[in-house]
Image (cartoon, rainbow, N blue to C red):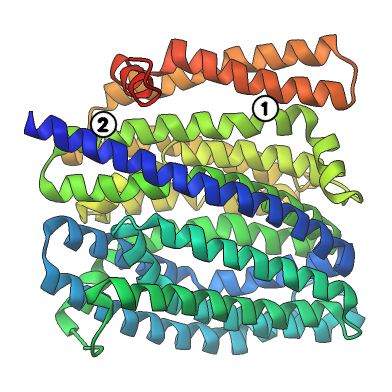
Amino acid sequence: MEQRGQISERSSRIAKNTVLLYFRMFLLMLIGLYTSRVVLKALGVDDFGIWNAVGGIVAMFTVVSGSITNAISRYITFSLGKGDAEKLRRVFSTSIIIQLLFSAVIILLGETLGVWFLHEKMSIPPERIGAAGWVLQCSLAMMAINLVAVPYNACIIAHEEMKAFAYVSIVEAALKLGVALLLALSPADKLVTYSVLMVLVALIVRSLYSLYCKRHFPESRGRIRFDASLIREMAGFAGWNFFGSTAYLFNTHGINILSNIFFGVGVNAARGVAAKVQGTVMQFVNNFTTALNPQITKAYAEGNREYCFHLVCRGAKYTWLLLLLFALPLWFEGDILLTIWLGNVPEGAVLFTRLSIVAVMADMLGNSLAYLELATGNIRKYYLIIGSVSFLVFPISWILFRCGFPPQAAYWTFAAVYLLLVPLKLMILKAQVGFPSGLFVRGTILPVFAVTAASFLCVKAVQALIPAGGWRLAATVLVTAAGTGAFSWLFALTRGEKDFILAKLRIR
């Protein structure tokens, strides 16, 4: 009874944090979509493409630090789950030192290799190369600010204090909206102005997170101490995580740079629009996974394998169903949705948006499996296999581009490779920790595919019966929501999950 009560309390905490994050998300989505429209209009298609392409160079240099970031999040959450306050303090202190060191290294790489690549390899109009240089410098500054903030953000997530994200994120969205409105009035070069102001926004936001942590979490206060043994331990963890981080960055930002080389800044603008839509959708899904993932790590740290595996299956299932709510309207009505949002839609943006959602659904299906692997800490074999296979996206896309295939070929390649990773992850985790792969297939994959097929057919019927326009858009959104909800209840939810929902709605 005590264990059941703890599980119920944890489920309620996940639900409460998810609701709080969704409130934040809806405000951010409304402000963010309008902000993107204003920024695209103020910058123009070419400068918007430059912003996305040059920013990708900096993201490529964060590959090693991205691995360390995952290590920091895992060690802070694991130490909190173990109740080891002293190690938690040492992990946080060591994390700050590590991020400062990596920030310095990445800035050095950006100022040497990054500047060379910008001037020698990228397809930038000659008259805009100076502005592109400003974008590079400001992107490096934002990267350094964000890296140093990682331990503070990891603390907030580990402690499950999601209200901090809700409040600070609303401030961040308001600041970005202010930047967009000022951009339209700026007499100076708008791309340069936008880059500088975005650095200022990053600095303000990260300062707010830091102040919150210092006020609420003891481990973030006090003198920063160097712990050589802990650095070696975290570096070993991060070293194997490096493969996965490297592959993902090459498969996203690397493909963005590859697209610039083969197709120019116009394709980067279209990919930038698709990336913004994808990012907005991912905010919606991440509100759930941000509330869930710390529970996976803590349950594993406590030795509660059954509950941990249950959370992994539930996380993959709910993530897919949440994505489906966006995927169907964007697939069938992407053209009118982007026109309403942007007015002037870059060529290819509608197709890229549709394919980017398909690609991210393939990736997110196995996302909770990756968090279970991170929780174990024994990631050598996992990332050696998964990192090697996922790395195939970049060279395959490069070969396809060289052979004359269009830029959308990269999205299909990404989706195919990341779907292949799901059975590989299941086999590794079954051998390593006894994860019930059969339960994952029966309880997650088959039900969500059944919901997807049934919902797709319902929306397809709407497309056939109603002519294109506002009424069909409204009908598509309504049928998607109703169909996904109804079919999820019929095919995807377990008896326990239905009882939990009914209890929260006070129907039972």
Q: What is the C-alpha distance between the residues marked 1 and 2?
A: 28 Å
Residue at 62% x, 54% y is 28
Q: Is residue 92 left or right of residue 463?
A: left
Pick the front one: 333 or 184: 184
Query: Taking the image as drawn, is residue 119 in sight?
Result: no
Residue at image location 28% in from the left, 53% down from the top: 374
Where 429 falls versus 469 (above or below)?
below
Counting from the top left corner in percent of width and height, residue 456 is at 65, 17
Residue drawn at x 69%, y 21% as measured from the top left: 478
Q: In the image, what residue type sits under mark 1?
A: Leu
Q: Residue furthest left?
A: 2
Q: Position of residue 12 (x, y in %)?
A: 30, 37
Pointer 1: what residue?
328
Q: What x and y, as percent, mark residue 269? A: 80, 58
The residue carrying pointer 2 sits among few (fewer than 14), some (14 to 19) or many (20 or more) residues within 10 Å by Cα, namely some
Q: Which residue is mark 2?
A: 310
Local SS, label 1: helix
Residue kind at label 2, given as amino acid type: His
Q: Is residue 43 above or below residue 457?
A: below
The quarter in which the N terminus is drawn is top left
Residue drawn where x is 32% and y is 66% of the image? 155
Going from the N terminus, do you reach mark 1 or mark 2 first?
A: 2
Describe the element under mark 2 as helix, strand or loop.
helix
Q: Is 107 left, or right, of 295 in this rendering?
A: right
Dot 1 alpha-carbon crowd within 10 angstroms: few under 14, some 14 to 19, many 20 or more: many
Residue 123's quadrant in the figure?
bottom right
